[in-house]
Amino acid sequence: MASEGEEVSPLTGDSMDKLAVWGIASDFVNLIRQDGADAHGQPALRTRAEGQGNPCRHCLQLIAEGEEMRVLAYRPFDTVQPYAEVSPIFLHQQDCPHYASDRLPAWFAFLQPALVRGYDRSDWIRYETGKVVAGTELEAECERILDDPDVAYVHIRSKFNCFQCRVERA
Ligand SMILES: [Zn+2]
């Protein structure tokens, strides 16, 4: 039963857990925009967005076609360890707002499919949490994974294994 102040789903009557969704840290993004080193120790490539499928991992919005962007190797972990995967990501070259919300960006519904998995406090994958889901199911799946108290946070990745964002309990 939902406690006071919790939202209740009109569909299921279950309490809805609040999520905390963030783009990657502004300090790091600003370094990259000034030719700072990426996860491979190289300056990010500077190019222009082609097509519609170029999400910026700072504002978590799509980069408009023709707009300047950076392409870099990104490791979404503080330390180098066996589970610290590196993937390519994009960033706006121009300033953009840092994403922080209790919801995923609406366009994530078009991720077909997305990869989702939980990590423990040692930044190791919790294997039972790994799933491939439709973008429309991502929020519910994040809430389900975060119900496990041994899960510290969730990562969402594209079908190409490119890191999209980190999700925690609000
Ligand atoms: Zn951006």
Image (cartoon, rainbow, N blue to C red):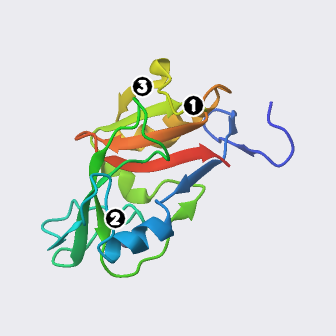
Find numbered disc 2 in the image and state the secondary structure of the residue it sits on: loop
For the residues carrying marks 3 and 1, which lies nearer the camera in this image?
1
Crowding around mark 2 (Cα neighbors within 10 Å: few <14, some 14 to 19, many 20+) is: many
Q: Position of residue 100 (x, y in %)?
A: 56, 63
Earlier residue among tags 2 and 3: 2
* Among numbered discs 3 and 1, the one appearing first in the sequence: 1
User: Looking at the picture, which amino acid does disc 3 mark?
Assistant: Gly
Give the labeled residue for mark 3.
130
Q: Is residue 50 left or right of residue 39?
A: left
Horizontal side of 14 relative to 65 (left or right) equals right
Query: x and y percent of residue 5 in the render?
Result: 82, 49
Q: CA distance from mark 2 to mark 1?
A: 27 Å
**Residue 145 figure quarter:** top right
**For the point 27% across and 52% down, which residue is it?**
40
Q: Which mark is residue 170?
A: none
* First along the sequence among labels 2 and 1: 2
**Amino acid type, residue under disc 1 in the picture:** Ser
Q: Which residue is mark 2?
A: 56
Q: Which residue is mark 1?
A: 122
> Which residue sits at x=33%, y=77%?
34
State left or right for residue 64 relative to residue 8.
left
Residue 13 in the image: state x and y as whole percent: 69, 34
**The one of 77 and 111 positioned closer to us in this rendering:** 77
Secondary structure, mark 1, is loop
Instruction: Indicate which quadrant contains ligand 1.
Output: bottom left
Whole-number angstrom distance, CA of label 2 to CA of label 3 = 24 Å
Quick one: 147 or 88, which is closer to the camera? 88
Give the camera-side residue of 75 and 63: 75
